[in-house]
Amino acid sequence: MSDLSHLPLDLQEIAAGDNAQRIAFIRGQWWIGYPQAQASLDLLGAAIENEPGRVRPQCFLVLGPTNNGKSMIIEKLRRDHTPPVLPGRDEENIPVVVVQMLTDPGVARFYQHLLEILGSPVRRTARKHDLEALALSILKRVGARILIIDELHNLLAGTVPAQREFLNLLRFLGNELRIPIVGAGTKDAYLAIRTDSQLENRFHPIILPVWVEGDELNRLLQSFVATFPLRKPSFLSSAELQRWILARTGGTIGEIAALLRSAAVAAVESEEEAINQRSLRLMKYQGPAERRRLTEKLLV
């Protein structure tokens, strides 16, 4: 067995295990608290504590390209603010309510989907007014302190009148519930909100840009490497390697994570036990540009 002193004690135990266990661990999902993500969590966490009850609570837009950490931040926020289930308590407490924006942005369909998320499915034929009254009642009963709408850019899939109706819904929900509303999506989510000057002023943007070469990227790579149960240390700090990783992944954290996990699995399977040039060559990873070229080639 190699010297495992480069790993924390809990990872040393995993690194001493068999390859199948280590690969399963590497392929699992876990939270990497890089500064921008932590700052976003702190801001949204403060809103949960301080904004509910205000006449016009501060709302937020979490914006960034696809696969750049928005959904992971939302899930982390939800987990951190989910209270334990107490024995003998019938009603569930759901301070963080997360719903995904449907590609059909109709208000009635949104309420139906929200009620399904809250565990209260309703008939498709239910009237919009009844759906609204029931959704508001349940949101108040479960103690919702923030409502997060993921994939908000899907709003633009609707007609202009449907978009306007849904924007009015966002304003109504914030005023009626007096809790922060958070939309998460690509820049198209901002373009949709921007069409309403009142909403644009109410929604504070939280930007998650793509990664670029530099110290922050280096710290991110080292944070990932520190979570892999590899039996030898990996060194990924060179500018040349950073540029190569950015070129392969397009600079989004989801693709960077996929590349590094693939390289870590290759390091175990090849017995390299570190992410290095050989394990990077052997990894089974295709970046966005490679996948696009392959698809286009197959469609010819």
Image (cartoon, grey):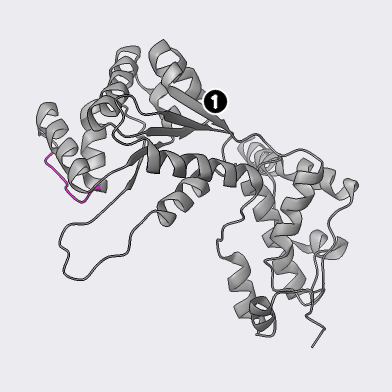
Judge whether residue 87 can be spotted in this image: yes
Q: Residue 287: horizontal and vertical position, in percent?
A: 69, 46
| 29 displayed left or right of 247 | left
Judge whether residue 196 can be spotted in this image: no
Q: Is residue 296 above or below residue 216?
A: above
Q: Is residue 45 above or below residue 261?
A: above
Which residue is pictured at 13% across the width and 38% down the height? 134
Q: Is residue 283 above or below residue 22?
A: above
The residue labelled by disc 1 is 187
| 64 displayed left or right of 181 | right
Q: The disc labelled 1 sits on which kind of residue?
A: Lys
Q: Nearer the viewer, residue 42 or 277?
A: 42
Which residue is pictured at 56% across the width and 61% down the height? 30
The part of the image, by quadrant, that contains residue 183 is top left
| 183 displayed left or right of 213 | left
Q: Residue furthest bottom?
A: 1
- Residue interval drawn in magenta: 118-123
Which residue is pictured at 36% across the width and 33% down the height? 180
The part of the image, by quadrant, that contains residue 258 is bottom right
